[in-house]
């Protein structure tokens, strides 16, 4: 007879509870910070952040337009999270997603602005550039036993400096502003449901692409032999090798696929035209924030979609704060706190399962006592 798992004991339910607790706690701490800064306007401030574009509920077109903008800006974050959780599920911590994202932005912007390629070729180049950057990290891991975290961090900074050097080109960048030019129409990703989002010109097929990628990752990891091999290699490389699996190939493939998704994230962002690249002294935060989104989403490809939108929703909410009383970056601080708390998602699940284990131990002990009485 099979034991029925209680509703609260299901892994998916526990993940959802842990993620919600982290998000709520982050918002509460953010509210306490607002109270410390300006008690009389703290309630108004937290409501402005949480209300976000619903501020325009009296103008449906405007509200939908800003909803579309929030969706567009959340897509690269979601894809970076998908890249990271794919590698993590295979036992690898791809902290190099930031560098792979940077490689993707180099490829997409250079092919669009300098070479004048069509959008699909630019997007494909971003995908391949991210895969190549992932291959380097995977090769170091597989053949030289270099930890993927060390290799990833090293390659992140190399990618950043390459971006600043390659894109500082008169064909690509307004040198006086240290900012890239707008993407030509030929390089813009085709629109998607723009009328439904207040004619938002940045709403493109990047949205369905992101959803398709999430579904594919879920299917590959949970429904295919290939996904099983990747996970098996990540959990125990020696055991996988003993079972006849090519451990080195699987390690490289895992990070290559993860890198390709991170590169695609950059292409899906910059080829909408919503943002220009500026010369930077720091690695794009998108790759690192993707780590938090992956954990907030319970390391589930579908959960990461909702987690990424939630994080971007809070970030965008900061622009509605009254600057007479608060700095808009308080919303970023709230997001940073939630990102920090994401590290406790697995810990909260551990606590929930620990309680379950204690119940099982007590039940087994009781059964043993009953058996002893029967023997007597």
Image: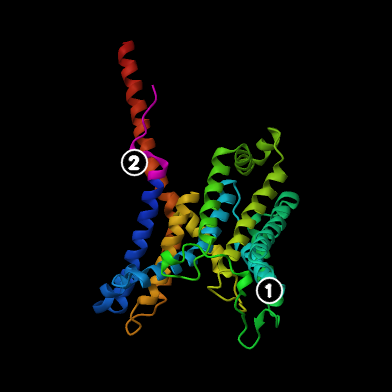
Q: Residue at x 66, y 60 (%)?
A: 124
287 is within the stretch colored magenta: no
Give the residue at the far left of this rendering. Answer: 40
In the displayed structure, would residue 261 be above or below residue 118? above
Mark 1 element type: helix
Q: Which residues are magenta?
A: 1-13
Mark 2 element type: helix
Give the residue at the far bottom of this rendering. Answer: 176
Give how far across and how far down residue 350 sits, in percent: 42, 45
Task: In this rendered view, identify the residue nearer to me: 235 or 362.
Answer: 235
Residue 334 can be seen in this image = no
Q: Residue at x 63, y 71 (%)?
A: 186
Task: In this rendered view, identify the residue nearer to me: 40 or 119.
Answer: 119
Q: Residues within 10 Å of mark 1 (few under 14, many from 20)?
A: some
Residue 371 occupies quadrant: top left
Residue 55 occupies quadrant: bottom left
* 183 horizontally vs 162: left or right: left
Mark found first going from the N terminus, 2 or 1: 2
In the displayed structure, would residue 120 be above or below residue 47? above
Give how far across and how far down residue 159 sits, in percent: 68, 68
The residue that label 1 is drawn on is 161
* 153 horizontally vs 80: left or right: right
Residue 344 occupies quadrant: bottom left
Q: Residue at x 53, y 61 (%)?
A: 205
Quadrant holding the C terminus: top left
* 64 horizontally vs 111: left or right: left
Q: Which mark is residue 8?
A: 2
């Amino acid at each position: 007879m099979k034991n029925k798992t209680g509703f609260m004991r299901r892994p998916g339910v526990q993940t959802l509870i842990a993620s919600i607790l982290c998000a709520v706690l982050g918002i509460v701490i953010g509210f306490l910070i607002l109270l410390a800064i300006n008690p009389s306007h703290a309630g108004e401030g937290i409501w402005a952040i949480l209300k976000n574009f619903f501020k325009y509920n009296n103008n449906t077109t405007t509200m939908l337009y800003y909803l579309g903008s929030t969706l567009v800006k959340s897509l690269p974050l979601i894809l970076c999270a998908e890249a990271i959780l794919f590698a993590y599920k295979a036992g690898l911590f791809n902290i190099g997603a930031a560098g792979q994202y940077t490689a993707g932005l180099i490829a997409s912007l250079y092919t669009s602005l300098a070479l004048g390629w069509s959008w699909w070729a630019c997007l494909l180049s971003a995908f391949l550039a991210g895969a190549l950057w992932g291959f380097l990290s995977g090769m170091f891991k597989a053949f030289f036993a270099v930890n993927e975290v060390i290799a990833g961090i090293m390659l992140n900074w190399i990618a950043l400096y390459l971006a600043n050097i390659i894109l500082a080109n008169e064909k690509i960048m307004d040198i006086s502003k240290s900012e890239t030019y707008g993407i030509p129409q030929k390089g813009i990703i085709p629109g998607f449901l723009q009328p439904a989002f207040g004619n938002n010109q940045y709403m493109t097929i990047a949205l369905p692409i992101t959803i398709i990628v999430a579904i594919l990752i879920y299917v590959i990891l949970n429904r295919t032999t290939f996904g099983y091999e990747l996970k098996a290699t990540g959990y125990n490389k020696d055991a996988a090798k003993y079972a006849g699996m090519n451990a080195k190939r699987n390690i490289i493939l895992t990070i290559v696929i993860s890198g390709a998704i991170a590169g695609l994230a950059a292409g899906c962002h910059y080829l909408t035209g919503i943002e220009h690249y500026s010369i930077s002294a720091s690695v794009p935060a998108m790759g690192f924030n993707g780590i938090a989104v992956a954990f907030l989403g319970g390391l589930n490809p579908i959960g990461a979609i909702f987690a990424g939108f939630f994080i971007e929703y809070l970030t965008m909410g900061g622009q509605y704060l009254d600057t007479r009383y608060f700095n808009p970056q308080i919303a970023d601080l709230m997001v940073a706190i939630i990102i920090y708390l994401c590290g406790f998602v697995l810990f909260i699940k551990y606590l929930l399962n620990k309680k379950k284990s204690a119940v099982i131990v007590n039940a087994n002990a009781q059964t043993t006592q009953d058996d002893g009485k029967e023997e007597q």
